[in-house]
Image (spheres, coloured by chain):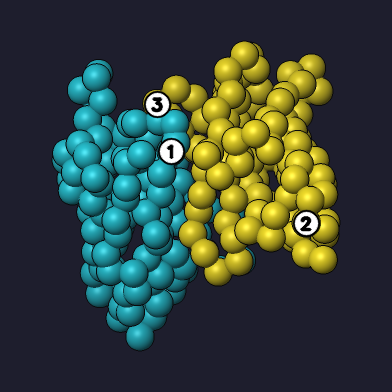
Chain colours: A cyan, B yellow
């Protein structure tokens, strides 16, 4: 199984400042079609997860453009350019290249300082 | 709009059984696979089971293989998760989520809580 490792696990941020979350996979996430199937999910307190980013860097409909994804191979990053209060929650990366199983990172909890 | 609504959660004793349902609306149901993903209290996300749009292929996490069965009724737009031989470590919120090949888990339901305790 592909192991997904996120860092940090806890991220206190100041409103209006940038934030960055790292996700590393135990093997390359490049699929046979040349694409990379790495997704990011946001889970706000008391809510179900919501997909933010698919295929490393594509924002889902309705996702603010302050969220961006980047990376390749085994190293990926989710960046928030200017954190807002509504961004508080837990963020998960998930690989969808080598399945089953689909595997998630441990989650990174974002809180406001 | 897309909706996935889980039901059937509750309190069950160790060794018992429970069946969760996931009711879908707002999209072409049979064109999408459905996965179940669970989240133990205060913990992260764990993929549990998957079924293709036509219902011909299923996959399970090792932790539930042989105890859980996923199925679907496309006429009723329902997906089921039959959970047998339940253990305390199966206690979690269970989410259903839809996806297509290489476009995974784009929408999730609100979840159903399953508590396994004597």
Q: Secondary structure at mark 1?
A: loop
Tell me: residue A13, above or below residue B82. Answer: below
Q: Secondary structure at mark 3?
A: loop
What whole-number distance in Å separates the C-alpha atoms at marks 2 and 3?
A: 36 Å
Q: Which residue lies at the image location 26% right of the left edge and 25% below the top edge? A: A31
Q: Which quadrant of the structure image shows residue B10?
A: bottom right
* Mark 1 crowd level (few <14, some 14–19, many ≥20, 10 Å Cα): many
Q: Kindly tell me whether residue A80 is visible in this rendering.
A: yes
Secondary element under disc 2, as helix, strand or loop, is: loop
Residue at coordinates 76% horizontally, 29% vertically from top-left?
A: B78
Quadrant assignment for the C terminus of chain A: bottom left
Residue A1, image quadrant? top left
Query: On the same chain: label 1 and label 2?
Result: no
- Callout 1: chain: A
Q: Pointer 3: residues within 10 angstroms few (<14), some, or many (20+)?
A: some
In the rendered image, which residue does mark 3 sit on?
Answer: B102
- The mark nearer the N terminus, 2 or 3, is 2
Read off the residue under disc 1. Answer: A102
Q: Is residue B12 above or below residue B102?
A: below
Q: Which mark is residue B14?
A: 2
- Observer-side mark, 2 or 3, equals 2
Residue A104 locus on image (x, y percent): 41, 49
């Amino acid at each position: 199984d592909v192991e997904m490792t996120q860092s940090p696990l806890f991220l206190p941020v100041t409103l209006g400042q940038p934030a960055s979350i790292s996700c590393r996979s135990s093997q390359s996430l490049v699929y046979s079609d040349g694409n990379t199937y790495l997704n990011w999910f946001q889970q706000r307190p008391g809510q179900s997860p919501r997909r933010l980013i698919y295929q490393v860097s594509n924002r889902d409909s309705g996702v603010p453009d302050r969220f961006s994804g980047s990376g390749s191979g085994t190293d990926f990053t989710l960046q928030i350019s200017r954190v807002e209060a509504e961004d508080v929650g837990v963020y998960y990366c998930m690989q969808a290249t080598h399945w089953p199983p689909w595997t998630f990172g441990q989650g990174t909890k974002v809180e406001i300082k | 709009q897309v909706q996935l609504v889980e039901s059937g959660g509750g309190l069950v004793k160790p060794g018992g059984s429970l069946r969760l349902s996931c009711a879908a609306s707002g999209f072409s149901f049979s064109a999408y696979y459905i996965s179940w993903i669970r989240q133990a209290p205060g913990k992260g996300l764990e993929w549990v089971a998957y079924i293709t749009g036509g219902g011909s292929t299923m996959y399970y996490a090792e932790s539930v293989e042989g105890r859980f069965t996923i199925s679907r009724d496309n006429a009723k737009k329902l997906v089921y998760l039959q959970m047998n031989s339940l253990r305390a470590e199966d206690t979690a919120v269970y989410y259903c989520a839809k996806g297509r090949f290489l476009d995974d888990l784009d929408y999730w339901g609100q979840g159903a809580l399953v508590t396994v305790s004597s």
